[in-house]
């Protein structure tokens, strides 16, 4: 594991964007696994800046997002599809049809989960997976549990996750209680993993996840077993 401790959020974002752009430059048709949340916003901003300068070309890139809230569609400002469109996809030259986010409004959610995994398989798996980490150690929306769930699945969000994410929704009651998330198998099969985290509040869970026992109670702890993971942390 490569662990970079940097001073500022901006530095974390720049370093993460560096690794993502290196991936795209080396393999223009990369399959990028992408994440939402406050943490990657700076990384996406940096990528947009370099794209505008002509330094990165996303025209052949395919993206696969980790998760989506059940019941929220692309027009809902709190959906992860909306987040990705506004914070990245609409500002770079990625082909929209090549951007995949689980469909939280699918009539048959079980079917959507199966389709999502099938798609990842057909694309040949993820080259670089960007991850944030939740305060309870979740990655994507893989919440603490008795087991590591392998495939894309529907989850009941933890109370702490609902509370943490209520800052975007205005009230706790408006936060969806369920989400659809990529499972651990697709994440762990990614050739490279890039985990970013910032803020004092994330320090304890990050330490537990990266240096404590590997347990499904701290879903991110499984990342210790990945052969090519870079973690970038800024206390800011
Ligand atoms: C959300 C997302 C995760 C993200 C995490 C941390 O619930 N599903 O993919 O990593 O929360 O979010 P933030 O970066 O806002 O702290």
Image (cartoon, rainbow, N blue to C red):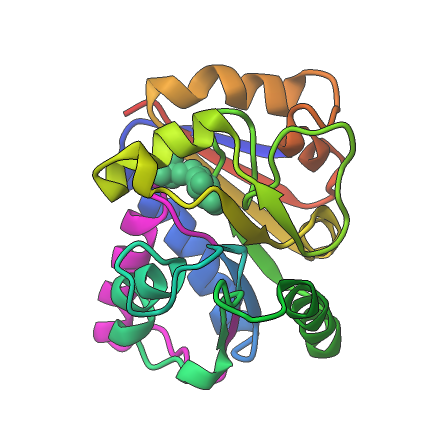
Q: Residue at x 55, y 18 (%)?
A: 207
State the image coordinates of residue 84 (x, y, percent, origin top left).
35, 63
Quadrant position of the C terminus in the picture = top left
Left or right of 106 in this view: 122: right
136 to 85, vertically: above or below: above
Q: On the picture, is 130 further left or further right than 167?
A: right
- What residue is drawn where x is 68% and y is 50%? 183
Tell me where residue 180 sits by quadrant: bottom right
Q: Position of residue 203 (x, y in %)?
A: 44, 18
Q: Is residue 44 above or below residue 134?
A: below
Q: Position of residue 94 (x, y in %)?
A: 39, 80
Q: Is residue 59 visible?
A: no
What's the residue at 49%, 67% (across, down)?
Answer: 101
Give the quadrant of the N terminus.
top right
Any part of residue 18 in sight: yes
Residue 166 forms part of the magenta stretch: no
- Residue 59 in magenta stretch: yes
Q: Position of residue 55 (x, y in %)?
A: 31, 73
Looking at the picture, tell me which residue is in the foreground, 90 or 174. Answer: 174
Q: Quadrant of ligand 1?
A: top left
**Which is more toward the observer, 42 or 116?**
116
- 206 to the left or right of 166: right
- Numbered range of the magenta stretch: 35-63
Residue at 38% across, 54% down: 17
Looking at this view, is 50 or 103 the one in front?
Answer: 103
Residue 11, quarter of the rendered image: top left
């Amino acid at each position: 594991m490569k662990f970079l401790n940097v001073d500022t959020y901006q530095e974390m974002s720049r370093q993460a964007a560096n690794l993502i752009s290196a991936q795209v430059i080396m393999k223009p048709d990369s399959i990028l696994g992408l994440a939402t949340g406050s943490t990657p916003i700076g990384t996406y901003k940096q990528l947009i800046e370099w794209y505008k300068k002509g330094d990165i070309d996303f025209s052949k890139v395919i993206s696969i997002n980790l998760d989506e809230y059940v019941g929220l569609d692309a027009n809902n400002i709190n959906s992860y599809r909306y987040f990705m469109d506004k914070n990245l996809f609409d500002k770079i030259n990625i082909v929209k049809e090549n951007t995949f986010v689980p469909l939280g409004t699918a009539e048959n959610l079980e079917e959507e989960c199966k389709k999502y995994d099938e798609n990842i398989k057909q694309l040949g798996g993820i080259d670089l997976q960007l991850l944030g980490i939740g305060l309870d150690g979740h990655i994507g929306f893989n919440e603490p549990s008795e087991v590591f769930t392998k495939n894309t699945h529907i989850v009941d969000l933890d109370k702490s996750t609902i509370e943490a994410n209520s800052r975007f929704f205005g009230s706790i009651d408006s936060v969806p209680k369920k989400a659809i998330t990529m499972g651990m198998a697709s994440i762990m099969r990614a050739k490279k993993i890039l985990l970013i985290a910032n803020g004092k509040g994330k320090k304890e869970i990050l330490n537990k996840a990266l240096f404590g026992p590997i347990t499904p109670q701290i879903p991110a702890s499984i990342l210790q077993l990945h052969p090519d993971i870079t973690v970038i942390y800024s206390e800011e």
